Image: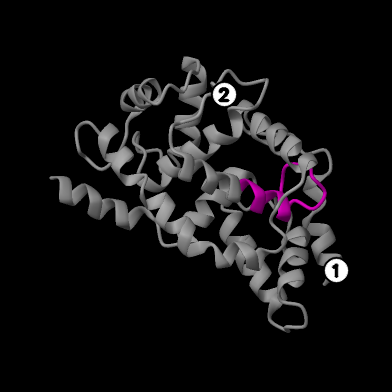
Amino acid sequence: MGGVLGKDDSPKKGWIPETKLEAKMVEAMRRRAAEGSSMRSFNQLILKFSKIDESLRNCKTIFEQFDEDSNGAIDHEELKHCFLKLEIKSTEEEISDLFEACDINENMGMKFNEFIVLLCLVHLLKDDPTAHLAKTKMGLPNLEATFETLVGAFVLLDKNKDGYVSKSEMVQAINETTSGERSSGRIAMKRFEEMDWDKNGMVTFKEFLFAFTKWIGIDDNEEEELGDENV
């Protein structure tokens, strides 16, 4: 099994980010990894699921506020208004890059789960000297604490601090949590597959965030219901 994991991890050597935004995410995460993480085990993250779920769902009022036409999605123009209102200074290119990265269904509108991922990416990138995103707070202290927890969780998984999570790193994290359990390898592989949605053997912070929203029950179906309520 070790050989298989090593083979699957091979793309990591000399891996080149696919987009400018991914490159910024990776660089920012590498810096955060160098600082270390207060998260000590994957189980510690699991124990925080309920609290994180509650915090992220509080974003719904923000989402509804900027979903100006109440269609259950935030389009590019609405996102620009959102950034302006939250005092998130960024270039037109950065807004477009974030929108395209988080609108994973490519339907020209971000659902609630996609909006959460975008805000968390903004939180990560605002301290990136290569990005123009403002370092000012979003005015949401509880939410920012939640985002810090998610950043810390990714740092925990990224054992070699290269800005990505591989299969072997996920297996190691789960083994540290479920020491001695025969099912730990299977659990790790399942979690990794849920994160690696483009199936390239590498998990970015963005992929981790999308998987996490599903783990705590925030997904597209819920947001379709949100849109229906606003009709």
- The residue positioned 77% from the left and 46% from the top of the image is 36
Q: What residue type is labelled 2?
A: Lys
Say which residue label 2 marks. 135
Q: How many labels does the image show?
A: 2
Disc 1 to disc 2, C-alpha distance:
42 Å
The image quadrant of residue 169 is bottom right
Closer to us: mark 1 or mark 2? Answer: 2
Furthest residue toward left: 231
Residue 194 coordinates in the image, percent (x, y): 56, 60
- The residue positioned 23% from the left and 55% from the top of the image is 225
SS of the residue at dot 1?
helix
Residue 23 visible somewhere in the drawing? yes
Residue 117 visible somewhere in the drawing? no
* Quadrant location of the C terminus in the rendered image: top left
Furthest residue toward top: 91
Q: What residue type is labelled 1?
A: Gly
SS of the residue at dot 2?
loop
* Quadrant location of the N terminus in the rendered image: bottom right
Residue 164 coordinates in the image, percent (x, y): 72, 46
Mark 1 or mark 2: whose residue is earlier in sequence: 1
Vertical comparison of 39 with 67: above or below? below
Say which residue label 1 marks. 2
Vertical comparison of 165 with 28: above or below? below
Residue segment shown in magenta: 151-165
